[in-house]
Image (cartoon, rainbow, N blue to C red):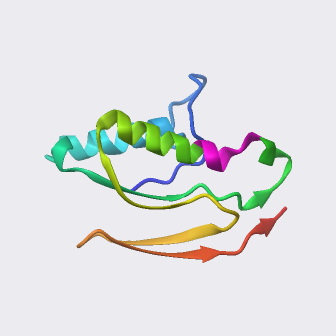
Amino acid sequence: MNHYMLPLWNGDGLASPKYGNIAIDKLIQKMLQSGAQLSNLEAKIFGGGNIIQSSFSMYQIGDRNIEMAYSKLQEYGIEIIKSSTGGNLGRKILMDTGNFKILHKFIEKQNF
């Protein structure tokens, strides 16, 4: 599971997993190093809501984060079996690591 804030690392500074392209690559590589096979991987995508109204809203970060997830997973050939993305509400995610079930609920928008 990962949670990134921005879609794309631009090459400046540290290649941090706060960027979608870095976070997804690192997660998949760690799974493969731990013995997973790419052909057995499936994905669930949550998030990308426009929950903060500010001057940064014009950058459509939530939409771009969603696009990054779909693009990267397609690049690896990983099927997306469930998703809840976009909109104007945030999400709280709970994952049961024993069976990989996801519980999620919507949370209210924050105005800053």
Q: Which x, y percent locates residue 58?
A: 80, 43
- Residue 66 image point, x, y percent: 54, 48
45 relative to 12, above or below? below
Residue 90, given in percent of the width and then of the height, sits at 63, 66
Q: Quadrant of residue 106?
A: bottom right
Q: How many marks?
A: 0
Residue drawn 36% across the image and 33% down it = 75
Quadrant housing residue 87:
bottom right
Residue at (71, 62) in percent of width and height: 51
Q: Quadrant of the N terminus?
A: bottom left
Asked whether, in this view, residue 21 is left or right of residue 74, the answer is right
Give the magenta-colored segment's residue range: 59-64
- Dividing the picture into quadrants, the one containing residue 45 is bottom left
Relative to residue 13, is residue 64 depicted above or below? below
**Which residue is at 53% across, 49% downward?**
4
Say which residue appears at 86% left-offset and 47% top-offset: 55
Q: Is residue 96 above or below residue 37?
A: below
Position of 18 compared to 2: left or right? right
Q: Quadrant of the C terminus?
A: bottom right
Q: Is residue 61 covered in magenta?
A: yes
Dominant secondary structure (helix, strand or loop) of the stretch shown in magenta: helix
Q: Say left or right for 111 vs 105.
A: right
* Residue at the farthest top position: 11
The answer to whether residue 91 is magenta is: no
